[in-house]
Each structure stands twice: as structure tokens, then as C-alpha cells.
């Protein structure tokens, strides 16, 4: 029987992708970088061992230890992103845009830790107001990662809005447990748009009943644009523009009649208002 041959790399020759990279910095730069880390304590331990072996080294070792400790304690403290606000020191990773001078530490959003260096990751207030993408496959932990970020506003005494497109039931339990940890379980409000047949709807938001003219107009225009049979396609472009202009003119009138005349806004009333006879009677006779 012939021996089976395997084509491809075996376990013995496989290498991690990180092994392909080499640190090209000079040796003294890497040495200074190591002395700034937690490994700096081994230098003092080595000096103490040398003094124990040869007491004559006590005086120079003491002077060198004092100088080395002063250099280590006065070094710049830099984290991968921002320094936390409670550090109360200059953050060289957060310079002023005008003069590029370091500003005081302003980190208030704790993201977690670097999985290699174990350093804390903080964001400032202005960083937290930007959009962030969290990519990942199914089951990678995207929801858990976003939920961990919600701990920050709760620790400030503030709140957050969490929109889950998959409507996982465990998310509500996790949010409620997190709110209870901070004594805020009475502030949790769930809007569930997926309810069983016959169950009472928990979603009480009605844009036609409470929205202003801009909200209602944008809602109706988005329905026209997303319609597969209409929208801005082919020869429908001119008609879509006319429809958008018509809705922009009718929506303020419908909202005014809802607020001051008690006329509710729904799909039927909007369809009736877009007819030519209704528009003429509304403009000429002010009758709806």
C-alpha cells in the first residue's frame, strides 16, 4: 500500500502572521522603551542583588537608583487613545488643534483594554460624538460590545437608546440587569414592534399624531423613494419631484388642522388631501 502524501503546510511548519514582522527600531530605542514599562523594577532589583554580593557598590548603586527612579517617575504617561479625566495630567495624544500643545486629560468613555499591552482605552467627549463601526460575524459579540459601552452613560447619571434590529429577547434582560445595577430599572422603556397576534402593542409612537410637518414630510417622501414601482427611476423622476413638492405644501396644512381643528392625520386623510378637488376646496374655500 502506497503512503498517502499530504500537499500543503503541516502543523510543524505553520507560523502565526505576527512572526513575519520584525522590530526594526535601534537597540537603544527598544531598551529605553522597555525601561519605561513595568520591567523597570527589575533594574532596581538587580542593583539590590549587586549590593548584596558586593557592598562596595552601595553608594554608586544608591545614586544610580535615585536618578533612574526620578527618570521613570517623570516620564510621559501615554495611552493608546486618551488619558482618563481623573488622571488630571497633560495628554500628549490629545493636542490642541490650534497650537498642537497637549491638553489636560479628558477621557470619559472607557472602551476596555488592549488585549496585548493590557493598557486602558479611553475616549474623550468629542470622540464619543463621532460615528463608530463595529464589524463582526454572527456570534462575534457585537451586541455585547455595544452594551458594554452603555455602562458609561449610566455611570454619568445619564441614559442611552439601544436599537436592536434582530430583537433578541436576551438583550432586554441584559439592559434591565445593567440598569438595576445602577438603580435605574424604573427608567427602562422597551418599544417592541414584534408582538404576538392578539397581544397588546408596546409601541405607542405615532408620527402622524405627534410629529411636526418636517417629520411627516420626510416620512412620506422616504416611502415614495423606497417604492420599487416608483421613486427616482426612469421616467418617474419628474412625477416624483411633483409628488414631493405636493407633500411639502400639504403637510403644514394637515399639521395645522390636526393641532388646531382636531382633524386626525392618517393614510386615508393624506390620500384624500392629495386629490385635486380637496386641494381646490382647501385653498379656495378653506374646507377640508
Image (spheres, rainbow, N blue to C red):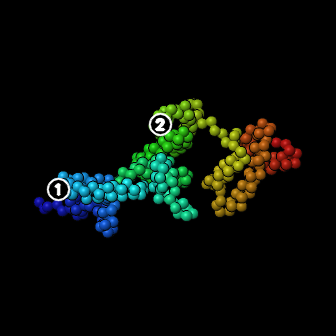
Return the residue nearer the eye: 194 or 12.
Answer: 12
Label 1 crowding class (10 Å Cα cut-off): few <14, some 14-19, many 20+? Answer: few
Q: Where residue 214 sits: x, y (%)? A: 70, 49
SS at circle 1: loop
The residue at 46%/49% (across/down) is 87
Return the residue nearer the eye: 47 or 247.
Answer: 47
Horizontal relation, residue 277 to residue 224: left or right: right
The residue at 86%/44% (across/down) is 286
Return the residue nearer the eye: 201 or 256.
Answer: 256
Is residue 144 among the parts visible in the rendering? yes
Q: Which mark is residue 54?
A: 1
Seen in the picture, residue 125 relative to 178 is either above or below; the reply is: below
The residue at 32%/69% (across/down) is 26
Q: Where residue 31 sits: x, y (%)? A: 30, 63
Horizontal relation, residue 187 to residue 4: left or right: right
N-terminal label among 2 and 1: 1
Q: CA distance from mark 2 to mark 1?
A: 58 Å
Label 2 crowding class (10 Å Cα cut-off): few <14, some 14-19, many 20+? Answer: some
Is residue 17 among the parts visible in the rendering? no
Q: Nearer the viewer, mark 2 or mark 1?
A: 1
Q: Where residue 230 sits: x, y (%)? A: 65, 56
| Quadrant location of the C terminus in the rendered image | top right
Q: Which mark is residue 231?
A: none
The residue at 18%/62% (across/down) is 5
Amino acid at each position: 500500500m502506497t503512503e498517502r502524501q499530504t500537499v500543503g503546510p503541516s502543523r510543524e511548519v505553520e507560523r502565526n502572521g505576527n512572526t513575519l514582522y520584525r522590530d526594526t527600531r535601534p537597540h537603544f530605542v527598544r531598551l529605553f522603551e522597555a525601561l519605561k514599562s513595568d520591567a523597570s523594577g527589575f533594574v532596581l532589583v538587580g542593583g539590590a542583588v549587586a549590593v548584596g554580593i558586593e557592598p562596595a557598590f552601595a553608594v554608586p548603586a544608591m545614586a544610580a537608583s535615585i536618578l533612574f527612579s526620578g527618570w521613570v517617575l517623570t516620564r510621559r504617561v501615554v495611552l493608546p487613545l486618551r488619558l482618563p479625566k481623573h488622571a488630571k495630567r497633560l495628554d500628549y495624544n490629545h493636542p490642541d488643534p490650534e497650537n498642537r500643545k497637549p491638553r489636560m486629560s479628558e477621557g470619559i468613555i472607557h472602551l476596555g483594554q488592549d488585549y496585548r499591552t493590557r493598557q486602558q482605552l479611553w475616549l474623550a467627549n468629542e470622540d464619543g460624538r463621532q460615528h463608530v463601526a463595529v464589524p463582526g460575524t454572527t456570534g462575534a459579540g457585537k451586541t455585547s460590545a455595544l452594551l458594554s459601552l452603555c455602562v458609561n452613560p449610566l455611570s454619568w447619571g445619564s441614559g442611552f437608546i439601544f436599537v436592536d434590529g434582530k430583537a433578541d429577547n436576551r438583550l432586554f434582560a441584559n439592559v434591565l440587569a445593567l440598569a438595576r445595577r445602577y438603580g435605574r430599572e424604573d427608567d427602562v422603556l422597551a418599544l417592541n414592534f414584534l408582538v404576538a397576534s392578539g397581544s397588546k402593542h408596546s409601541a405607542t409612537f405615532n408620527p402622524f399624531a405627534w410629529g411636526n410637518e418636517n417629520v411627516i414630510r420626510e416620512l412620506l417622501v422616504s416611502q415614495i423613494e423606497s417604492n420599487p414601482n416608483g421613486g427616482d427611476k426612469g421616467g418617474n423622476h419628474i412625477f416624483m419631484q411633483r409628488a414631493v413638492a405636493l407633500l411639502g405644501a400639504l403637510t403644514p396644512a394637515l399639521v395645522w388642522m390636526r393641532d388646531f381643528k382636531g382633524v386626525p392625520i392618517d393614510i386615508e386623510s393624506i390620500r384624500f388631501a392629495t386629490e385635486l378637488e380637496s386641494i381646490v376646496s382647501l385653498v379656495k374655500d378653506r374646507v377640508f
